[in-house]
């Protein structure tokens, strides 16, 4: 085969350390633009981003040479450095260790985009922990309850 053709989509979720409500509505759009720039500079495509004061959802389109763990590490490291340099919060901003990554089919892209866009509405009825556990169970991912959101 002369060429490689792919469409790889991931729904990424990660939280602020200790699930603190540090992401302010006053600067979250700036943060999302900054994260979009990080993804773009890594030659990947950010398709949707939104979240709540304690966590972020990102829908990515990636190339087959993308190491997802490295990309998320770079997003979190650079975004936290940027937040700290801007002094948006008192003290040091940090992300929770780890992240969730869930594959998305082409047919479900719009559904996931709508889900990410409507985070505020969604979280009126469901906590972040309930949402995250639902993802783990929906994707049949083995997990131990005692380690969900445990800080290391």
Image (cartoon, rainbow, N blue to C red):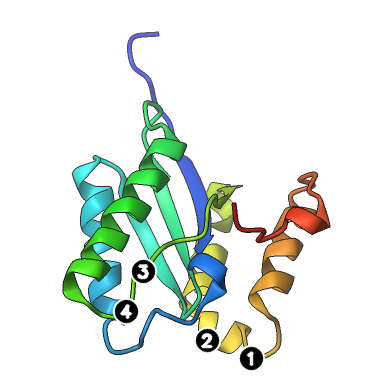
Which residue position is annotated with label 2? 120
Q: Secondary structure at mark 1?
A: loop
Q: Is residue 8 above or below residue 136?
A: above
Q: Secondary structure at mark 4?
A: helix
N-terminal label among 3 and 2: 3
**Quarter residue 62 falls in:** top left
Q: Where is residue 140 shown, x and y percent of the image?
A: 79, 47
Q: How many marks?
A: 4
N-terminal label among 1 and 4: 4
**Quarter residue 23 falls in:** bottom left
Q: Is residue 75 above or below residue 71?
A: below
Q: Residues within 10 Å of mark 2 (few under 14, many from 20)?
A: some
User: Label 2, label 4: how many angstroms apart (C-alpha)?
Assistant: 13 Å
Relative to 126, is 78 on the left or the right?
A: left
Which residue position is annotated with label 4? 28
Which residue position is annotated with label 1? 124
Nearer mark to the viewer, of 3 and 2: 3
């Amino acid at each position: 085969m002369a060429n490689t053709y792919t469409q790889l989509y991931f729904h990424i979720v990660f939280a602020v350390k200790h699930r603190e409500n540090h992401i302010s509505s006053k600067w979250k759009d700036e943060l999302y633009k900054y994260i979009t720039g990080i993804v773009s500079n890594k030659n990947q495509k950010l398709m949707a981003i939104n979240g709540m004061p304690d966590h972020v959802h990102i829908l990515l389109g990636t190339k087959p040479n993308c190491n997802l763990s490295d990309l998320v590490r770079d997003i979190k490291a650079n975004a936290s450095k940027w937040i700290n340099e801007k002094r948006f919060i008192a003290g040091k901003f940090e992300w929770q260790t780890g992240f969730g990554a869930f594959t998305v089919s082409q047919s479900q892209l719009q559904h996931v985009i709508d889900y990410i866009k409507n985070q505020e509405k969604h979280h009126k009825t469901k906590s972040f922990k309930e949402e995250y556990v639902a993802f783990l169970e929906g994707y049949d991912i083995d997990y131990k309850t005692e380690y969900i959101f445990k800080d290391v």
